[in-house]
């Protein structure tokens, strides 16, 4: 089986969006996909770690703590500078890995993934805050719904966009 992505722009936009909502989501999806369908393009790249089954497993475990921490009142807003930077780097790492894996330029993927992650961080932050205010629903409940959306979207993105092909 090999990785088949004919147009990496759309998957990277999806991954950047996920990164903007939950920092670790994009690397989790990317390592899951690339560890199951490694690319020869990454074998000599520093991004080869994104194909590691160990890295994929560790990120999946650590991402659960992010889902829990997000609901705590002491957790800073995602649009604080450190949160935006982390999400940007997450989207950039996922984007660079996907572009490089398909023979494209890692820098292009990094720029797209990072930029989309920043936009999604702000967009999802304000959407969540306005939804809580308008509907008088507790923020952790909306956060849990957001988690379900991120997990479902990540699963769908990994299954639909990265369909394996023989050869």
Image (cartoon, grey):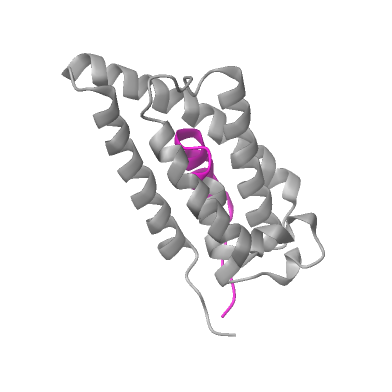
Q: Position of residue 1 (x, y in %)?
A: 56, 80
For residue 63, say whether it is visible: yes
Residue occupying image coordinates x 51% and y 20%? 79
- Count numbered badges in the picture: 0
Q: In the rendered view, tell whether residue 1 sits above or below residue 30.
A: below
| Residue 82 sits in quarter | top right
The residue most toward the right is 44
For residue 7, say whether it is visible: no
Q: In the rendered view, tell whether residue 42 sits above or below residue 137.
A: below
Q: Nearer the viewer, residue 68 or 162?
A: 68
| Quarter the C terminus occupies | bottom right
Residue 56 vs residue 52: left or right? Answer: left
Residue occupying image coordinates x 79% and y 55%? 46
Q: Nearer the viewer, residue 60 or 123?
A: 60
Magenta stretch in the rendered image:
1-25
Q: Nearer the viewer, residue 36 or 63?
A: 63
The residue most toward the top is 133
Q: Answer whether residue 21 is magenta in the image.
A: yes
Residue occupying image coordinates x 33% and y 24%? 128
Q: Answer whether residue 118 is magenta in the image.
A: no
Q: In the rendered view, tell whether residue 91 sits above or below residue 51.
A: above
Q: Position of residue 44 (x, y in %)?
A: 82, 65
Q: Position of residue 34 (x, y in %)?
A: 59, 64
Q: Position of residue 127 (x, y in %)?
A: 34, 23
Q: Nearer the viewer, residue 14 or 55?
A: 55
| Residue 147 sits in quarter | top left
């Amino acid at each position: 089986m090999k990785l088949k992505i004919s147009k990496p722009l759309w998957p990277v936009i999806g991954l950047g969006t996920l990164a903007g909502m939950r920092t670790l989501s994009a690397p989790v999806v990317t390592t899951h996909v690339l560890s199951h369908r490694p690319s020869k393009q990454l074998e000599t790249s520093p991004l080869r770690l994104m194909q590691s089954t160990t890295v994929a497993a560790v990120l999946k475990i650590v991402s659960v703590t992010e889902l829990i921490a997000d609901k705590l009142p002491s957790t800073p807003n995602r649009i604080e500078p450190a949160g935006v930077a982390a999400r940007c780097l997450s989207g950039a790492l996922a984007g660079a890995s996907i572009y490089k894996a398909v023979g494209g330029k890692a820098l292009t993927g990094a720029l797209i993934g990072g930029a989309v992650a920043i936009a999604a961080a702000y967009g999802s932050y304000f959407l969540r805050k306005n939804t809580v205010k308008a509907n008088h629903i507790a923020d952790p409940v909306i956060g849990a719904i957001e988690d379900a959306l991120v997990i479902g979207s990540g699963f769908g993105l990994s299954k639909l966009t990265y369909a394996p092909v023989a050869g």
